[in-house]
Amino acid sequence: MERTEEKPAGSTHTISLLVENKPGVLHRIAGLFSRRGYNIASLTVGPTERADYSRMTIVVRLSTKTVEQVVRQVQKLVPVVEVRELVPQDLIERELMLAKIRTPERNHAELRALAETYEATIVDVSPDALVVEASGPAGKLDALEERLRPFGIQELCRSGRIALERGFKTLAPPSIK
Amino acid sequence: MGKEKITGAMAVRRALEAEGVEVVFGMPGGTILPIYDAMFGCERPRQVLVRHEQVGGHAAEGFALATGRVGVCFGTSGPGATNLVTAIADAYMDSVPLVAITGNVATSLIGSDAFQEADITGITMPITKHNWLVTDVHDLPRILKEAFYVARTGRPGPVLVDIPKDVQNAEFEFEYPETVSIPGYHPPVREEPRLKDAAALIRSASRPVLYLGGGVRSAGAHQEVREFAELLDAPVITTLHGKGAFPETHPLCLGMFGMHGSKYANFTVQGSDLIVALGARFDDRVTGKLSTFAPEAKVIHLDVDPAEISKLVTATVPLVGDLRRLLPQLTAEVRRVFAEQGRPDLAPWKRRVAEWQAKHPMRYEQAGQKYLLPQYVVETLWRKTGGKAVVTTGVGEHQMFAAQWWKTTEPRQFITSGGLGTMGFCLPSAIGIQLGRPGELVIGIDGDGSFQMTLQDLATARDLDLPIKIFVLNNLFLGMVRQWQELFYENRFAQTPLPDRPDLVKLADAYGCLGLRARTTEELDRVIDQALAHRDGPVIVDVRVRRQEKVFPMVPAGAPLNDMIDGE
Ligand SMILES: Cc1cc2nc3c(=O)[nH]c(=O)nc-3n(C[C@H](O)[C@H](O)[C@H](O)COP(=O)(O)OP(=O)(O)OC[C@H]3O[C@@H](n4cnc5c(N)ncnc54)[C@H](O)[C@@H]3O)c2cc1C
Ligand SMILES: Cc1ncc(C[n+]2csc(CCOP(=O)(O)OP(=O)(O)O)c2C)c(N)n1
Ligand SMILES: [Mg+2]
């Protein structure tokens, strides 16, 4: 018989939640993750197509617990209307990055070219600093970050992942459609 | 119900009336005064004044566990609310339906560190099924309706509604909703229950065991369970909260298993090839070391809470749903399969179980002992009452002696704090039980340490003239901890001996209760008769027991379930 005690080493999962837009909901969810020992790699929350619901995307890193267990525990929270793991092959994920690069003006042209290859834009320019804005899957941003580093990253800010499933499927259950 | 213009406080009263609440336990204070004022003179629900809010919480739990109805307690803001925390946590661990209502400072003061302000919704978030801070009186009827609904449905549990004082005072048009609609509650179960797979597993098992838990009590499914068990004709074991799910006097019943279960019950799970778990959650007190738990067994796990499935032990066939609704379907399916394919031959398995029972019986020997043995006290009580009583306990050795030797035959007859293991539970719970079941004999089996945690509420029991009988198995020790010190800490009794005070007989007298004491078997006989005959208020019996009697068998924490020590 299997015992859930011993699990293979860590894995990362993207969980998407539709929650009631009420005070304290973030606290409830974050509290559940911390007290049950589920490691949050990133968490985003924002409005949806309906004013009374918010959508959260949580990237969770698990070593001993199963993702099914996480989903079921989260589902028990009363303000959580729906929760699902989004599997990588069905997933459109995006993240936003802002990076402030402190570099002399002579490097700006080279930076602009680099930004272009990553479909990033320069959103602020001052004599010795630039702010680069980029979006895309986490892997692309990781790569861009790597390339920017030699220019001197002063400040960097990433939003955490947001995600939707491909195709016509939606998270909202029929009861609230 | 028509509309009427009333205050938020009066709306609380109306809601409690509409919910059919019979009794509320609590203590007033500044921020809950409007609600107490609205309840003034109210006969139903009646108000019970406790001397500590924790007691109010446990009394509401006792009431709920004894009746199956929701327990209700009140507390004022700040310390009143935080005093409820232990009882709420207890109810959360043991799935007890409880509605706690607290006052809070006015909404304009929230967040300003006002006098007696505590963020009780924040504090109780991890120990409630859900909680609400009511900021607009118009939400109050809906929230109260939802609170009762959430507490009692699905897997029962505690909820808390925090109502600021200005919301209690605000006037509005009251109407109590008839229905509840919470989009995130009761998600539809997506999979069809795999009854056929479960029945096939049962048909092919040659060493099955039924594992019954507190879910049978919550579901009120003992009748359904009995039918199922007798159809399978397989051995039955229960958890601490499963006591009463199936008569312990029934030939199939092996009683409690786990850390302090019988050897034969533990050997039976360990040797099984199929575990059918009904409303139980594979707590570490029953599985022992997980990786060695029932190594050859497949598992059918029926539970109303999907998060319990495969949380600790992977279910071969999960069945998610309410026991009372789902189990008869499984029974029907098994009956069909048995009729078609014949019954499995369980005779060799049952012979093995019987051998274990014969070889490793539960036992103790009072004869020749200088002091009373706690096991003997429990058994004598059982004998003298014909087992016809509702029993509740504190936490410790006495609790385990009660679990081992009080043979429970009816549901809701054994009420104890299992998941949190809260000392001080016994007296409050006895109060709640007696109020919920007025005609019945209520017996507390308590410890001297546990009793002292909530004894001030003897006053409450006396106020209400409750004929509860509390037997304190007095070993002048925090016995369960001393037992661990004896076994694992080389008899270093750090802070476990309890001095012989207070004098429980005098204490009972001071509270206007009857106090009795027994040191010998003859005295025990006499005081039990005296206690049972006494109808004028509570009785406290100080039963002096052998100080270092230990609870055996015992599976040391983290050891495999079949590695039991028995002190021989
Ligand atoms: C000192 C001490 C020693 C202990 N030793 C032991 C021991 O030796 N053996 C032992 O058994 N316990 C022991 N306990 C108790 C133990 O800690 C647990 O509290 C207990 O084992 C849990 O019981 P349970 O599995 O029945 O679950 P409960 O906590 O009663 O949970 C009930 C389960 O039923 C489910 N359920 C609820 N309603 C329904 C429904 N309508 N339909 C279907 N499912 C439902 C719930 O979702 C939950 O999973 C001890 C406690 C203490 C304090
Ligand atoms: C509130 C609380 N504090 C501490 C404990 C730890 N503890 C468990 S059993 C026990 C001793 C209980 O003593 P007593 O009530 O006299 O029972 P006995 O074991 O002696 O029968 C203690 C301190 C607990 N369970 N609850
Ligand atoms: Mg003691």
Image (cartoon, coloured by chain):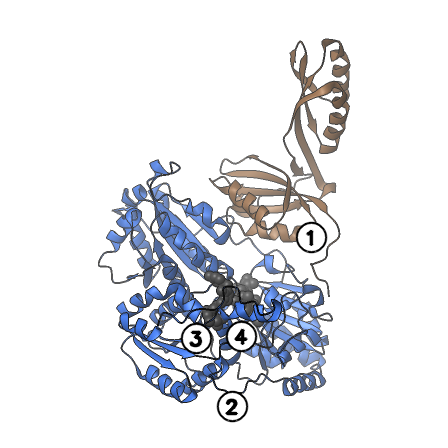
Chain colours: A brown, B blue
Residue B325: tell me if it is visible.
Answer: no
- Residue B122, given in percent of the width and then of the height, sits at 46, 45
Of circles 3 and 4, which is in front? 3
State the CA–CA distance, disc 4 to disc 2. Answer: 45 Å
Q: Determine which residue is flagged by label 1.
A: A64
Query: Callout 2: few (<14), some (14-19), or many (20+) C-alpha neighbours within 10 Å?
Result: few
Q: How many marks?
A: 4
* Residue identified by numbered label 3: B474
Q: Looking at the rendered structure, which numbered label has been put on residue B368? A: 2
The x and y percentages for residue A35 are: 57, 49
Labelled pair 3, 4 in contact (Cβ < 8 Å): no
Q: Chain of mark 3?
A: B
- Relative to residue B502, is residue B256 drawn left or right? right
**Please, what is the three-letter code of the amino acid marked with disc 2?**
Gly
- Callout 3 crowding tier (Cα within 10 Å): few <14, some 14–19, many ≥20: many
Secondary structure of the residue carrying numbered label 1:
loop
